[in-house]
Image: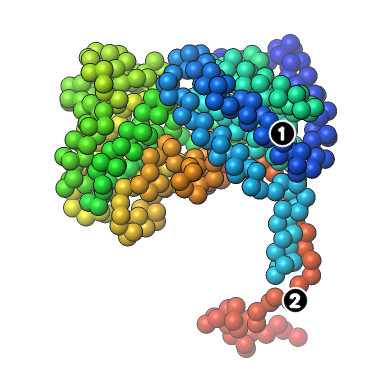
Amino acid sequence: MASKEITPEQLEVLEKLVEKARRVQGIIENYDQERVDRMCRAVAWAAGNPENFDRLGKMGVEESGAGDWNGRYGKRHKILGVLRDALRQKSVGMVEFNPEKGLARYAKPAGLIVSLIPMTNPELTPIVTAIYALKARDVVIFSPHPRTKKTTFEVVRLMREALKAIGEPEDFLQCVESPNMAMVNKIMTMGDLIMATGGPAMTKAAHSSGKPAYCSGAGNATMIFDETTDVEIAARNTRISKTSDFGSGCSADGNLVIYGGIYDAMVEALKNEGGYLATDDQREMLKKAMWDEEGHRIVATVAVAPQKLAKAAGFEIPEDRKFIMVVGDGIGKEYKFSGEKLTTLLTLHRYEGEFENALKMMDEIYKVGGRGHSCGIYSHDDDHIDRLALRAPVTRIMVRQPQSKANAGSAENGMPMTSSMGCGVWGGNMVSENISLKHYMQSTWVARPIVKDQPDEAILFGEFFDPSKKKPQ
């Protein structure tokens, strides 16, 4: 993705895509609720039915060389959740009315969305975006990651076929077939709204485009295990979260902050779930296999099986091991294992004494990276949960749940379903919540007269009100 000037030929490709999108934009924005809901169901099934999604997931792993070929299918639950959330909401006409305030809200489409697709979710993110966009009566041009462009193009092809099969314009959804960085930068300036799911470089580029952009921030998911932790449940959830797609997601557990009184039992429970505890020497070998001399993450060890990760580091682990654990050697920028790993490895940190010590450790971890994204806690102590919520610089905290299966929405929690998570100002993003249907729409507010609502000044200013202060005559 070398940065260079866009060629006339590349510009012509983009202009044709935009021309077709603008042509059909005026059609979809007049659709009724029943029609958009039918389109949502059609595209979701076409690309997200079990047979096709399994094929697309494996295609994405093979094309990128990252992720779990067998486990990628597990992300399909997000399609079901996104469709559930979309179908339960109105997106046409008046969608909200507050008689007490005399306010009515009417939903309007955002227009032409430019959707930047990450290498780690080339099959899922386009489906999620398409459901929400069509529901909101938007049109979309997808810009794939160059390393997974074939997968994303195939997903969009299936969805376009589904639209055509029910008599709808297939150009509601289009895809840049052979993108490079120059084309990505250009297409972002040609739409109305950008949906950018990816790393910090993508976020910076989207926010520099001159167009409104919803982005996701970087992760460094940290879990706190206090004295009330059920070690077996926590270990099982950690394994589920860490091994999902070989830890490719920003939500995958990265740092475990464990109370000293349960530390040994927790480590044993993690071993029982398939964890391999690396020696101090092996930890140093892993560090060299995961980061180069300048501190950049080495792509070859991103989202790989633990056996492949260990081999890259120069040692072997048993075939039945599902993830690697290293004991933290410190917290800070100079301690690489306290940052985001994006693979089947997590770091163990031990705290002693008061829960405040766990919070201090958590504070230091988020100074390394991942501010705004997510945190979790295994606790039955509401005071501990509340104190973490008040303190953690993140937009979402999962309680006693597998982080990577929960914070983007789950059938077992109330988080909005998504594949893109806003990380607030902490993460350089516009919103502090999961990016869902409401972010794909604009609103027109209609205000009717109500009974005057203006408290007396003495009530408003309270103790500071001084009736002697009058306007000079």
Q: Decide which of 158, 408 is in the foreground and name it.
A: 158
Q: Which mark is residue 170?
A: none
Mark 2 vs mark 1, CA separation in Å: 43 Å
Residue indicated by mark 2: 451
- Classify residue 157 as left or right of residue 18: left
Kindly identify the amino acid type of the residue bearing the numbered disc 1: Met
Q: Residue 208's spot in the image, x, y percent?
A: 62, 33
- Judged from the image, the secondary structure of the residue bearing numbered disc 2 is loop
- Classify residue 164 as left or right of residue 45: right
Q: Residue 141's spot in the image, x, y percent?
A: 69, 26
Q: Residue 76's spot in the image, x, y percent?
A: 52, 30
Q: Decide which of 376, 461 is in the foreground and name it.
A: 376
Q: 10 Å neighbourhood of mark 1: few (<14), some, or many (≥20)?
A: many
Q: Decide which of 127, 206 is in the foreground and name it.
A: 127
- Judged from the image, the secondary structure of the residue bearing numbered disc 1 is helix
In the rendered view, would you say 267 is above or below 321?
below
